[in-house]
Amino acid sequence: MAIRLHINIDHVATIRNARGTRYPDPVFAAQLCEQAGADGITAHLREDRRHIRDEDMHRLRASVTTLLNMEMAATEEMLAIAERVRPDVVTLVPERREERTTEGGLDVQGMRGVVENAIARLRATGIKVSLFIAPDEATVRLSRELGAQQLELHTGDYCHAPTAHELERLRVAAALSHALGLEVAAGHGLTRQNVIEVARLETIVEFNIGHAVIADALMVGLPQAVRDMHAAVNRGVAQRG
């Protein structure tokens, strides 16, 4: 079974913004990723624009030939931008200015009204909607009820403590999501080493991975880093069943 690998190019923009230059260009990075076999490109437009910027999203939309996944908070500002950019997929994620990166899954229950409205607006525009959630049964069921089409399971707890318990949480949540008719993706903290066990979970069809690929790219180049991650994912898939 083939499994999709989407590369998050946020941290190419992080490096660019550190010096206020035009390079490295995240759009060119996305093109290199696609040429190396990436099945899609992910970019998170944050409220504080710490890496990806509005113009990056528009340029990505014009150039990405595979699939463009826009990560964003469920705010009025971001919904309006998504309606203009028209990415293939929007992944709704939690966001706090003080965090270094996304911490934990979306509080679907606590933000029920906001999330339901965002899903309805995006789907009305023809955009597929994914929710980035913790591997929790109640959250999976509520996400389905509110109209999500895909769930991306937060793998951060497993990556920080790769125990059998955390892997089982992912397996159960992925199996339930699949049983409810949802596509199952996974991401956060995944590397060439720890992705293999997660890729063995039979109902996961997509990974969104960024930081580890960009870090590897410093040593081996971006195209090779993408190919190496693909190979690691495929080793896990080959062990299914």
Image (tube, rainbow, N blue to C red):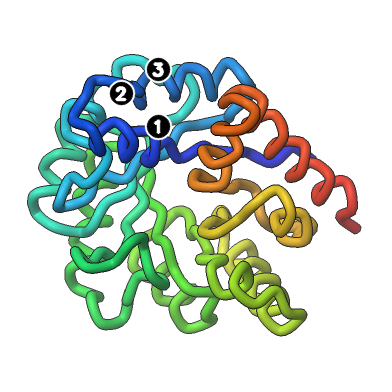
Residue with the mark numbered 3: 28
Residue 68 is tagged as 1
- Picture quarter with the C terminus: bottom right
Separation of residues labelled 1 and 3 (CA atoms): 14 Å
**Which residue is at 33% across, 67% downward?**
146
Pointer 3 and pointer 2: residues touching (CB < 8 Å)?
Answer: no
Q: Amino acid at mark 2?
A: Arg
Residue 155: x %, y % from top left: 57, 66
Q: Is residue 56 above or below residue 126?
A: above
Separation of residues labelled 1 and 2 (CA atoms): 7 Å
First along the sequence among labels 1 and 2: 2
- Camera-near label (1 vs 3) is 3
Query: Element at badge 2?
Result: helix
Residue with the mark numbered 2: 61
**Which residue is at 49% across, 47% downward?**
211
Q: Is residue 143 above or below residue 91?
A: below
Pointer 1 and pointer 2: residues touching (CB < 8 Å)?
Answer: yes
Circle 3 residues within 10 Å: few <14, some 14–19, many ≥20: some
